[in-house]
Amino acid sequence: MERRTKKRFEVCLDAIWDGTTGNSQARVTDLSEDGCYVDSISEAVTGEILHLKVQLDDGDLLDLTGEVAHTFPRIGFGLRFVELSVTQRQKLFALLDRLRGSTDRPVARICA
């Protein structure tokens, strides 16, 4: 049964996450208002709160905080956003609006 309520967008955005095991490189491959999926060979722990810095195609960074909802060891994990500031939400929603097609400017590449 699908538990997600928000539209998800396929993206390919480089990222770095900072959790209990330190900094790890990753790639965000799907994104919504509520969370994202993070491809990473470094392991996160379900329930862990971590910080994710997503590199946008315009060179800007999107800083997000989330709780690891589920993991697939050495493949990736689902992240549910928590305690986002007004600024973080505004930046996330602006990105999602662009992904919806409200501008012609590309914001993310599709992963090959």
Image (spheres, rainbow, N blue to C red):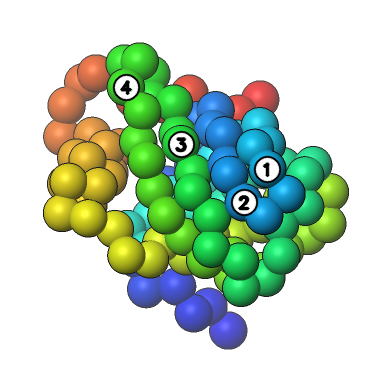
Q: Which residue is mark 4?
A: 60
Label pair 2/1, CB-CB below 8 angstroms: yes
Which comes before the other along the chain, label 3 or label 4? 3
Q: Is residue 64 visible?
A: yes
Which image quadrant is residue 44 in? Answer: bottom right
Marks 2 and 1, Cα distance to the nearest angstrom? 5 Å
Which residue is rendered at x = 35% and y = 15% of the image? 59
Q: Measured from the top left, where is residue 40 in percent x and y?
A: 72, 42
Mark 3 and mark 4: span between their CA atoms? Answer: 10 Å
User: Front-most of 63 and 71?
Assistant: 63
Mark closer to the observer (3, 2): 2
Q: Which element type, helix, strand or loop, lies under badge 3?
A: strand
Dot 2: element: strand
The residue sitting at 23% across, 34% down in the picture is 98
Element carrying mark 1: strand
Residue receiving disc 1: 22
Q: Tell me which amino acid carries mark 3.
A: Lys
Image spot of residue 105 (x, y percent): 24, 18
Packing grade of label 1 (10 A; few <14, some 14-19, many >=20) is few
Mark 2 vs mark 4: give the one in front: 2
- Mark 4–mark 1 Cα distance, whole angstroms, equals 22 Å
Q: Earlier in the sequence, mark 2 or mark 4?
A: 2
Q: Is residue 27 above or below residue 7?
A: above
Density class for disc 2 (Cα within 10 Å; few <14, some 14-19, many ≥20) is some
